[in-house]
Image (tube, rainbow, N blue to C red):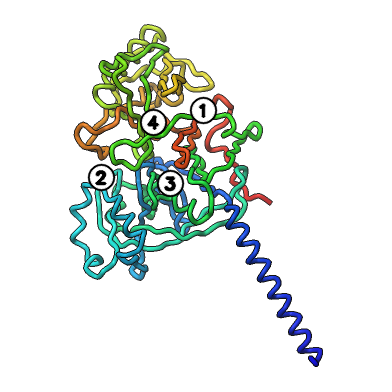
Amino acid sequence: MLNPQEKNMSQRQSFLLAVALCLLAASTLASALGGKPLVTPITKDGSTSLYTSPLKDGRPLVLDLSGPLIWSTCEDSHPALELYERECTEAIRYTRPECWAYAGGSDGAAAGKCVAHPFNPVAGKCAAGDMTRTTLSANATDGKNPLYPVSFPAAASCAPPSLLDRLPAGVAGVAGLAQSELSLPAQVAATQGVARKFALCLPGVAIFGGGPVFLLPPWLLEITSAMGSTPLHRFQEQPGYYIWINGINVNQNPVPLGYYNTGGGQLVVGFSTTIPYTALRHDVYRPFVEAFDNASTSGFGMQRVVAAAPFELCYNQSKLWSTRVGYAVPQIDLILEDGTRYGVFGASSIVQVDDATVCLAFVEMKPEELGYGHGQAPAVVMGGYQMENNLLVFDEEKQELGYSTLLLFRQTTCSNFNFTMAA
């Protein structure tokens, strides 16, 4: 027969066992049902026009829609993945062609460690570095507020400090968001049990894993329930995100694009968070700027002034009048696959370069600077400025791009997510 002390201890052990079983059951149920999406703020760096999120020990990573890897500088004592591990195979699979020159020069490879080849999309540089396991952090969210902090493991490549060249001061590296098994969205989906999709609202907020997106003010708006969509496509062997369009209109008139205007093909449009302004291939850029200039001077009374690099078309700001969605200028429309229009309005098409001058915020593409080989560049690569204050949802599972169009129409912006922790 147990004495009172032994009886109390036995009861306590039984209670603790019951609690442990309950916690295990709850954990198993949560895993089966999936976790919460994760939210992180996005800041635009004034010097580089790059977008960062504080994902690694509170230090920012540059967001790269075309990047297949997460990479950062590492401590000397970091753990290294072995050659046989799955993440090693994936890392090698996504090595850019221009990075293979670095493949044979690593002591890690000679020691049997997994060596990846991270790429700086701004400087156009590669390096060699061990694949490692690191810890990233964000907050769980219900789409309205952050709920609680979440830390999660991620496979990432180490990189030398020299690879941070031309990135914002203080960043630790780059978070690739592209369609790969080692991108940030893929690893969040795998560790949190959430959908392989993410909402991107520049600059302001990113939500990984699906769910609603609410923005303030003047009232709490749920944005994702009233969005258009268009299919995502693959292009060449690139891991980024691409859509097809049937053409481009300026002020409701089709831009004459030669071969593409005859119905013989469609234009490929990519998305990049590492170029500041939308870049158009030469054969698309020339007729586009001519169409915009004709419409702006004849129909809108805009007055040309001396161009300010890197832009070709600049105008006298005093001759323009403002609207809720930017300066009143010719509207640009991307004609999507189903014939619907993705509108680009003054707030997205015109940039103020000084007190007296505004410019058309589109540039002529230099494919080699964007990492595309000769003849393999898409017709259009949409840059960060044109994506700002437009909620975009990249859904890899459905291969679909959701878009809100300009949020200024709804009297809100991407910076209006409420980052106050929910009570």
Q: CA distance from mark 2 to mark 3?
A: 18 Å
Q: Position of residue 79 (x, y in %)?
A: 37, 68
Which circle, 1 or 2, is nearer the viewer? 1
* Residue designated by label 3: 52
The furthest residue to the top: 298
> Relative to 97, is 143 on the left or the right?
right
Q: CA distance from mark 3 to mark 1?
A: 26 Å
Q: Position of residue 77 (x, y in %)?
A: 35, 70
* Residue designated by label 2: 124
**Front residue of this view, candidates 286 and 419:** 286
Residue 235 found in image quarter: top left
Q: Residues within 10 Å of mark 2 (few under 14, many from 20)?
A: some
Residue 283 seen in this snapshot: yes
- Label 4 amino acid? Ile
Q: Residues within 10 Å of mark 3 (few under 14, many from 20)?
A: many
The relative height of residue 142 versus residue 102 in the rendered view (above or below) is above
Residue 173 numbered mark, or none: none
Query: Is disc 2 in contact with disc 3, using a CB cutoff of under 8 Å?
Result: no
Q: Position of residue 301 (x, y in %)?
A: 40, 9
Query: Is disc 2 in contact with disc 4, using a CB cutoff of under 8 Å?
Result: no
> Relative to 34, is 394 on the left or the right?
left
The relative height of residue 356 versus residue 365 in the rendered view (above or below) is above
